[in-house]
Every structure is written in C-alpha cells, then in structure tokens.
Amino acid sequence: EDQVTQSPEALRLQEGESSSLNCSYTVSGLRGLFWYRQDPGKGPEFLFTLYSAGEEKEKERLKATLTKKESFLHITAPKPEDSATYLCAVLNDYKLSFGAGTTVTVRA
Amino acid sequence: DTGVSQDPRHKITKRGQNVTFRCDPISEHNRLYWYRQTLGQGPEFLTYFQNEAQLEKSRLLSDRFSAERPKGSFSTLEIQRTEQGDSAMYLCASSYGGPNQPQHFGDGTRLSIL
C-alpha cells in the first residue's frame, strides 16, 4: 500500500527565513507526485506536479524537487501570506494518496 | 474557469439522518473524485468517476454511502443513517485528460453529526 510521510508536522519561520519541507514516499508505481497548499476551511490548491526523479518546478518563492524516494518543497524568503498547510500526494493509477501535511506559520 | 463548486458548505445533522452533497466540477472535466478529510490528516480517496461511470470505490465507502454522476456532469454523494464517525470534510475534485493530470479541489462540505 502507498505510504506518504511528511516532516516536520509544523514549522514556524520568521519572515525571510528560508526552509525546506520533506515528503518521503513508497509506492509501487509512481505516476506523479503532487504538492498542494491548503488554507484553513478551504480545499487543497494545486501547486506542482513532478513526474520523474531529478525534475524541479518553481513558482514564486516555492521550489519543488523529486528523487526516487522523496520530494522537497523549498520556501525561499517566505512572507506571512505563505502561511498554510502544505500537502504532498502520490498518484497510483488515478487516485491520490496524501501525507498528513506540514503546517507552516510565517511571522512578520 | 469558475472552479469546482460544492454545496452545501456546511451541514449539521442528527445521527441517523440521511444527507446528500452536490459537486459541480470544472466545465469539461471528464474525471471526478470524492475524498474525505478529518482534522490533522490529508484527504483520503473515496470514489472516482470517469464521465458517468463509477470506476472505483474505496473500502472506506461502506454500503451507507452512494455516489452518482448522471450524464457525466455534476455528482452527488449520499450518506444514509449517518454515524458520529462520518463527521469530516467531504472534498470533491475534478481533472481533465489523462489520469496523471492535476486534480483541482473544491472547498468541501463540512459535515457535523450531533
């Protein structure tokens, strides 16, 4: 069965303090790794898809990378509006298996 | 692109009652998914439609749960004889094209069982 583990569970950052979130996975056949952002009371918002080891994607202050066993979401010089829960998920066939998320709080 | 729409946003009901949720996917999205999310956890897959055909149901989906997608457009998720353990956020997502395309989520229906 697919397993996705995210660490840390929570991350408190000062504005401008860069950091990385980890997503470790085991899946029988990876068809894609997805990163989502979720704000309280809202549904997950799609950020990135990574399909193969070595692939990288960037969007504003976020950069996602992928290896054969894990993915990292790097947050560079975060701002308070980057505060959210970040979820990663692996795609097996057509369904997503999610980790529990990392809740990021950025203080001004 | 108006996004995935879910209704109602919140539902409070007594244990034993039946509830029905509606999901309107992004226009022309052929794939539709239902997930359930509890506090502090990521979403868990419930069921999947390609057009109007329901192709898989998770073992989480007991016989009290039923989902439909008539004519391959909107979808409904019904829970009969609700139980305390059904309290959760029910999320709908849709995607277009192949199964490895991003799934776009609505803001969910939060169900509270009294």
Image (cartoon, coloured by chain):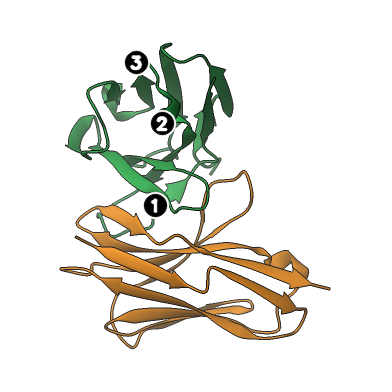
Chain colours: A orange, B green
Task: Identify the mark nearer the N-term, 3 or 1.
Answer: 3
Residue on which disc 2 sits: B85
Q: Work out whether disc 3 and disc 1 sit on a shared chain.
A: yes
Amino acid at the residue labelled 1? Gln
Tell me if mark 1 has few (under 14), some (14-19) or many (20+) residues whose alpha carbon lies within 10 angstroms of its own.
Answer: many
Query: From the viewer's perspective, is residue A84 above or below residue B8?
Result: below
Secondary element at tag 1: loop
Q: Is residue A83 above or below residue B80?
A: below
In what element is the residue under mark 3? loop
Tag on residue B103?
1
**Residue B58: horizontal and vertical position, in percent?**
23, 40
Q: Position of residue A47 (x, y in %)?
A: 50, 65
The residue shown at (23%, 67%) is A31
Residue B20, picture quadrant: top left
Work out how far the residue at label 2 is from the one at label 3, CA to CA, in angstroms.
13 Å
- Residue B107: where, in percent of width, then height? 55, 40
Decide if residue A6 is on the left or right side of residue A76.
Answer: left
Does residue B57 appear left or right of residue A99 in this picture? left
Residue highlighted by disc 3: B80
Q: Residue furthest top?
A: B17
Q: Earlier in the sequence, mark 1 or mark 2?
A: 2
Judge left or right: residue B63 versus residue A8. left
The chain identifier of the residue carrying mark 1 reads: B
